[in-house]
Image (cartoon, rainbow, N blue to C red):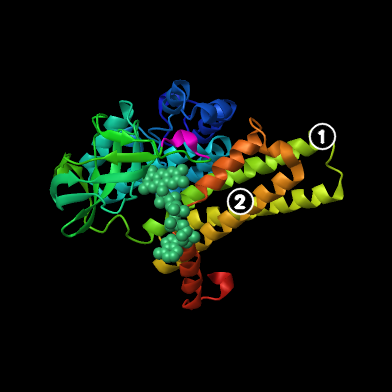
């Protein structure tokens, strides 16, 4: 029997099974991917073959409906598995899912169908929101000519259909672009410690003409709550996956070196397991709350903001525990602990963490709920 929303070509395997198999391939290739700072063609081919590229689209457009609220638990599990294998690919997948979700929520059916056709034909999407001092502008909220560039664009040079934010006379708009791949891309600044193969760079989009067909939703939709801040659980899920991988690598190290009975190491292991599971529970709950479409948007956002803080703290704690427990080996390439820690430390840097934390605290401060119900 086919699993729910499962295309016939994946007969007998759930999306999670397929993501798990792809993750194993990603992990085997991860040292090479990191060394070359390039995701191999065989990984992209498998990414498509196993259905992850199309997975966020609804079933009638060839996907698994993964970006629908009722599938958020499964999306969380997929992101954890990918994050556990290679955070760079997990980050690109997260951006792709976010873009499809935004088109699904704010765009019209024709726009979603057109994007699905482009992705089925080999495309990839992303959300490019970060700006330099000048930003990206468009003449009118119903279309016009783009002027400016986007920075910190993951997948610069191979993302074909990015969703970009731009400033229009009536506010911030979302434009779904079809790149020709002739645009000027600058990856020279991406000399990051980790996440090397995300190809995160700047792209000049000046001169691209956008019409109504490219404009997704209404001005202000991108930052509409609770979805804007509430969706942070997705990158947190990828962080949790990498944190869990570090705990597994630590356990393997202790068993292999026969150091597992040492009381100090056992204490470290206990703390590492507790931190990884704490982060996972928070992220799963943040995903669940956004999915159930709670009336109290402020509480959903507040919880998501606190989840960011918890996930970051737990990841940093696990990195320190594992590095101290394994020692120098964990700093020497190509040991996977070295790579995973480097990627995780880099990807943990997300926008305005202080503001997220303090907004989370403020939401509780002014909430009528007891802490147990917040
Ligand atoms: C691997 C990777 C891939 C990425 N890909 C994309 C992408 O595809 N698309 C995209 O749009 N972005 C992307 N980004 C960028 C990302 O969305 C964030 O913009 C970026 O990570 C922010 O990092 P930051 O540490 O500079 O943040 P900041 O927000 O500058 O935070 C740095 C510190 O400054 C503090 N701070 C921030 N603002 C203030 C203030 N006004 N006053 C005082 N303190 C302040 C913060 O709390 C924090 O302590 C990517 C980032 C990474 C790491």
Q: Position of residue 314 (x, y in %)?
A: 62, 54
Q: Residues within 10 Å of mark 1 (few under 14, many from 20)?
A: few
Q: Quadrant of residue 328?
A: top right
Residue 63, image quadrant: top left
- Residue at image position (44%, 22%) is 41
Asked whether the residues under the numbered discs 1 and 2 touch, taking CB atoms below 8 Å apart as contact, a structural biologist would say no
Looking at this view, is 220 or 15 the one in front?
220
Quick check: 341 above or below 285?
above
- Of 150 and 307, nearer the camera is 150
**Residue 372 percent location from the top left of the image:** 59, 71
**Residue wearing tag 2:** 315
Please give the name of the residue rendered at 57% of the width and 73% of the height, measured from the top-left corner.
Answer: 371
Element at label 2: helix
User: In this image, 318 relative to 159: left or right?
Assistant: right
How far across and how far down the image is residue 215, in percent? 20, 47
Q: Is residue 373 left or right of residue 317?
A: left
Residue lying at the far top in this picture: please name it. 42
Give the percent coordinates (x, y) of residue 5: 41, 35
User: Quarter-wise, where is residue 29 in the image?
Assistant: top right
Q: Which residues are magenta?
A: 194-199
Q: Which residue is mark 1?
A: 257
Q: Is residue 78 magenta?
A: no
Residue 291 is left or right of residue 328, and the answer is left
């Amino acid at each position: 029997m086919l699993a729910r929303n499962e295309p016939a070509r994946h007969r007998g395997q759930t999306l999670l099974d397929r993501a798990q198999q792809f993750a194993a391939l990603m992990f085997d290739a991860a040292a090479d991917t990191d060394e070359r700072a390039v995701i191999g063609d065989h990984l992209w081919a498998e990414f498509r073959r196993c259905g992850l590229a199309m997975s966020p689209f609804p079933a009638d457009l060839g996907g698994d409906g993964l970006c629908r609220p009722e599938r958020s638990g499964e999306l969380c599990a997929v992101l954890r598995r990918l994050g556990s294998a290679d955070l760079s690919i997990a980050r690109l997948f997260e951006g792709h899912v976010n873009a499809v979700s935004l088109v699904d929520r704010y765009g019209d059916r024709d726009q979603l169908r057109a994007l699905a056709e482009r992705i089925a034909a080999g495309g990839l999407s992303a959300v490019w929101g970060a700006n330099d001092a000048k930003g990206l502008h468009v003449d009118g909220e119903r279309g016009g000519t783009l002027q400016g560039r986007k920075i910190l664009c993951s997948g610069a040079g191979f993302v074909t259909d990015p969703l970009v934010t731009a400033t229009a006379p009536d506010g911030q708009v979302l434009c779904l672009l079809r790149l020709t791949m002739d645009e000027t891309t600058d990856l020279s600044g991406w000399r990051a410690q980790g996440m090397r193969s995300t190809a995160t760079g700047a792209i000049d989009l000046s001169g691209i003409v956008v019409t109504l067909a490219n404009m997704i939703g209404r001005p202000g939709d991108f930052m509409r709550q609770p979805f804007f801040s509430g969706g942070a659980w997705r990158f947190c899920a990828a962080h949790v996956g990498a944190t869990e991988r570090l705990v597994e690598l630590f356990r393997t190290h202790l068993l292999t070196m026969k150091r597992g009975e040492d009381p100090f190491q056992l204490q470290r292991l206990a703390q590492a397991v507790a931190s990884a599971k704490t982060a996972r529970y928070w992220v799963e709950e943040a995903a669940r709350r956004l999915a159930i479409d709670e009336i109290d948007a402020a509480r959903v956002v507040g919880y998501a903001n606190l989840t960011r803080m918890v996930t970051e703290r737990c990841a940093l704690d696990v990195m320190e525990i594992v590095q101290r427990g394994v020692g120098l080996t964990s700093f020497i390439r190509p040991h996977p602990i070295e790579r995973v820690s480097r990627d995780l430390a880099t990807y943990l840097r997300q926008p305005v963490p202080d503001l997220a934390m303090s907004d989370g605290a403020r939401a509780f401060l002014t909430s009528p709920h007891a802490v147990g119900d917040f």
